Image: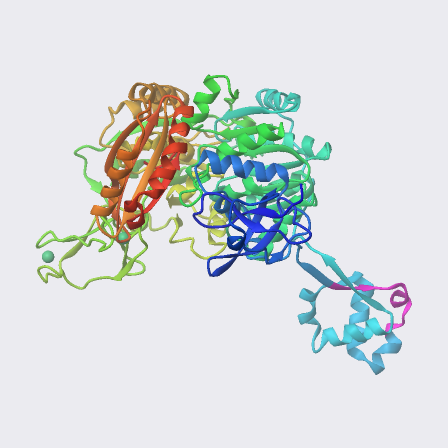
Amino acid sequence: MSVAVVKVAVPGPLAGPLDYRAPAFPPPVGARVQVPLGRRRVVGVVTGHAGESELPPDRLRAVETVLDETPLLDTELLALLRWGAQYYHHPLGDCIATALPRRLRQGAPATPGEERYWRLTEAGAAANVTALRARAPRQALLLAELQAAGVLRPAQLPGMGGDARGALERLASRGWAEVVQRRDYGLIEGDSEDPAPALNREQADAAAALAAATGFTALLLDGVTGSGKTEVYLDAIARCLAAGRQALVIVPEIGLTPQLLTRFRRRLRGRLAVLHSGLADGERLDAWLAAREGVADVIIGTRSAVFTPLARPGLIVVDEEHDASLKQQDGFRYSARDLAVIRAQRLDLPVVLGSATPSLESLANAGRGRYRHLHLGERAGGARPPRFGLLDVRGRPMQEGLSQPLLQRVREHLDHDGQVLLFLNRRGYAPTLLCHECGWMAECERCDARYTYHRGRARLHCHHCDREQPLPRHCPECGSVDLRPLGLGTERVEAALEAAFPETSLVRIDRDSTRRRGSFETRMEAVRRGEARLLLGTQMLAKGHHLPAVTLVGIIDADQGLFGADFRAPERLAQLIVQVAGRAGRAERPGEVLIQTHHPEHPLLQTLIHHGYPAFAQAALAERQAAGLPPERSLALLRAEAPGAAAPRAFLDAARNTAPATRVELLGPLPAPMERRAGRYRAQLMLQADARRDLHALLDVWLPRVAALPEARRVRWSIDVDPVET
Ligand code: ADP
Ligand code: ZN
Ligand code: ZN
């Protein structure tokens, strides 16, 4: 077949690849090309070749520029993206765009950044610095530096005074130094300085199961916090590197800390590439290319790292697999965990999903025998699990949300050299500002939500659309100046704790207090060194950090999560409590966890504190089964939003009416739990099916009809397969 036509996946809402006339030397599948699209010019990826097009010749436009001579996306990654496009019913071009670093999306060449530096030559090593000093003092200084260090990098030059670059060029022209230009991927060099600890029995069993896995095996590493899951990953990764293969490690955003990277660097011998949203575009590109070219041995990154091309893949790890941040919430709504499993299956590799609080989905998969279930029940190093207690606060006097018994225990722990962690999952001073005269409440104009009062910044801030307002001086309804904060946020509890424990150093950790780069780490460091004795924070505290000196954990308000609108709310709450509790305690001093609640009899809390997370999860799974919710049944949401309330309803009604009758159950349309957000009204139609297959069969025939509805043009709509927020 002569290739006259290339199929190009372009970014945007178009469902399938488009036909373009191929140049004389057609680009291979997986290469990027620049093509005209309407009046724009876009970067797309070649997904196929054809002898001819169904388009009439005069409508067939030509490829303008071929950006890659060789495929940028290999067959495996392209096939994974195709799979994802089909499963999540999202346009392939947009899936590909999600997978590519921005620079590549914009058409930049697929080459890493270069580093330029100066290196001493043999002649330079023999040259006489003293003789040079009189004639060219700056050159003499730099030559002496070079003779001592061997190389000089641009970053070192500012300290050398004057025109150091010029002086180096002159040294180079004398043949005493040479300019070196090399590709630099910005990798972290692992030095395996730290010896691996001897694994305990459970760890060794888990590690052996992993070592024995040849080909695709999915393992659920279900280990209490501090049980040494990371050691099991490290053991498997080291084995993988020794076999000359690459390991891909996916962690939630908040889990990717300098602490974790240091641990990996000091334990592994190999080059580490890091991928997360905080990278500059160039850094991201370099890390991506290093993985693709096989220069990096370990790729550690957040959600989108699941799409990193791998030259010699050997192992995939997903840490904190229950974490909601592994699911993308807009555009290509993929689950990095689920795609990691699919990718491992297609690559025929082992994949480990680790968590102290596994998702009900993964537990169900383990129950059905799809995942091998590995348990780590003991804390490594002999630390004992914390003791749980419920604090019934009904009818008790409270000081800014803190009951007397809790304050009392805080004092006792502090008096006994303990460290105390208090958890409240709400930042700001108070979630509401209320007029005491007339009852007016400060509400966001764009959302069905109240403004959060931030006292430090003296602002009202909507946590749903990010809108900010200066603090009103008086009530807009009645003019009263008696405006009062209602409810609790971390800022408010911080003030109360400072008043109650004026002598104790306190650190607050939430998104407001850690806005500056590195401040989260600085604060956690102060906690680890024991300088801060009282620690107060949001769910930022629940992940990734071991705080062995913490002896008391207080959950200030468990009631928030008990009655959430989302059917996953109890699961989330249980995971948060267990994760926060898991920060505490060590061998000689087991931790204590106190949970304040107005609902001490609640079955969820009872099961959780008396029987632990596994028992809770079994009960929650049984409930989901009875209610016909995931993971028992498969779920998808058709969402729609528009500036008015009518359009989303009309669209979803019309969509419902075009759906063929199948075994899939349609529920709704219903308003979204928060109907108006950022000035847009939102509604949704829920699809439920016993068999995933039926759901996908329906979506395949139905979505094209939905897209063609005239009502679809008046809304923004999307389909979310396996939603984590409903
Ligand atoms: P997890 O990932 O399950 O939360 P980690 O792997 O971070 O647990 O281990 C918790 C702590 O226990 C770490 O400080 C780690 O160095 C230590 N640790 C883990 N395994 C062992 C072991 N076999 N012997 C001694 N210390 C260990
Ligand atoms: Zn008022
Ligand atoms: Zn808002």
Pick the front one: 158 or 193: 158
Vertical order, 298 against 627 (above or below): below
Asked if residue 122 lies in the magenta stretch, the reply is: yes
Instruction: Describe residue 158's horizontal placement relative to residue 228 as left or right.
Output: right
Q: Position of residue 413 (x, y in %)?
A: 38, 37
> Any magenta on residue 211?
no
User: What is the basis of the colouring in this image?
Assistant: rainbow
Q: Residue furthest bottom?
A: 135
- What residue is rendered at 33% in x and 51% in y? 502
Q: What percent of the width, then of the height, locates residue 622?
A: 34, 18
Question: Would residue 496 be seen by someone viewing this image from the given angle?
Answer: no
- Answer with the quarter of the image where residue 686 lies: top left
Q: Can I make out residue 148 in this image?
A: yes
| Residue found at x 63% / y 55% | 67
Viewer-proximal residue among 601 and 366:
366
Q: How far from the left and from the top, in percent, is residue 663?
A: 33, 22
Q: Is residue 542 left or right of residue 488?
A: right
Q: Position of residue 570 (x, y in %)?
A: 32, 30
Q: Identify the magenta region.
A: 117-129
Q: Residue at x 20, y 62 (%)?
A: 472
